[in-house]
Amino acid sequence: MTRSAAILVGTLLVASHAWAQQPLSVGDSGVQAAIQKTFPGSTILVAADVDSRECGPAPESPGFVAGDFEGDGRPDFAALVKIGETGKVVDWEGRKLHETRYAFAIFLATSDGRYNPKRIIRFLEYWPVMTFITLQPPGMLRGPGDDRRGSAITLKSPGVELINCGKSSVVYYFSNKYVREFWTSD
């Protein structure tokens, strides 16, 4: 192989690897298509949707995180979406709170570039919501845990932490092709 052919092959290998490692974003068409197929008409939570009085400052992206959750080299994502109001409104401490339908879902990348929901949790809460998600990096986790795994685990791949402000938090992660949960606070 000539030197120029070797450089071209090396460039193609680096370029294809870099493409596979590019992070997903809320605006990606495949992300939006998967969310709308699963939750038609929904919107991904933004910082203004999170109750800052109860939660403090919301993360920059409180309704979207991406990472290789399965460890298969493909970027997956999780979303916390607002589906719509129920019509019920309550007065609480001088504020009008609107009961709203929400959903949390973890989407896994398929070999053909699409995303399939793996875990879906639907719930009702008042807007502004006291819930958001963050990316949990690999490594040691401690908390109340669960009966099966005890009070500490080590994540091999990133997970998704679902935080209910002032109440609890749980990390969802993959192990042996299953979504598991580990309580980090209760």
Image: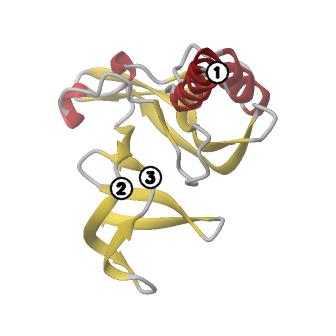
Tag nearer the camera, 1 or 2:
1
The residue to which callout 3 is attached is 159
Residue 26 position (above or below residue 100):
above
Hey, which quadrant is residue 5 in on the image? top right
The residue to which callout 2 is attached is 138
Q: Secondary structure at mark 3?
A: strand
Q: Residue 180, image x and y in percent? A: 53, 67
Q: Residue 39, image x and y in percent? A: 71, 30
Residue 186 visible here: no
Tag nearer the camera, 1 or 3:
1
Name the one closer to the observer, 68 or 57.
68
Name the one closer to the observer, 123 or 162.
162
Q: Is disc 3 surrounded by few (<14), some (14 to 19) or many (20+) residues within 10 Å?
A: many
Label disc, if present, on residue 162 of the rendered structure: none
Q: Secondary structure at mark 2?
A: loop
Q: Earlier in the sequence, mark 1 or mark 2?
A: 1
Q: Residue 75, image x and y in percent? A: 58, 37
Q: Earlier in the sequence, mark 3 or mark 2?
A: 2
Measure the alpha-carbon separation of dots 1 and 3.
45 Å
At 48% from the left edge and 65% from the top edge, which residue is drawn? 181
Q: Is disc 1 surrounded by few (<14), some (14 to 19) or many (20+) residues within 10 Å?
A: few
Label disc, if present, on residue 2 of the rendered structure: 1
Give, as a three-letter code, the residue at label 1. Thr
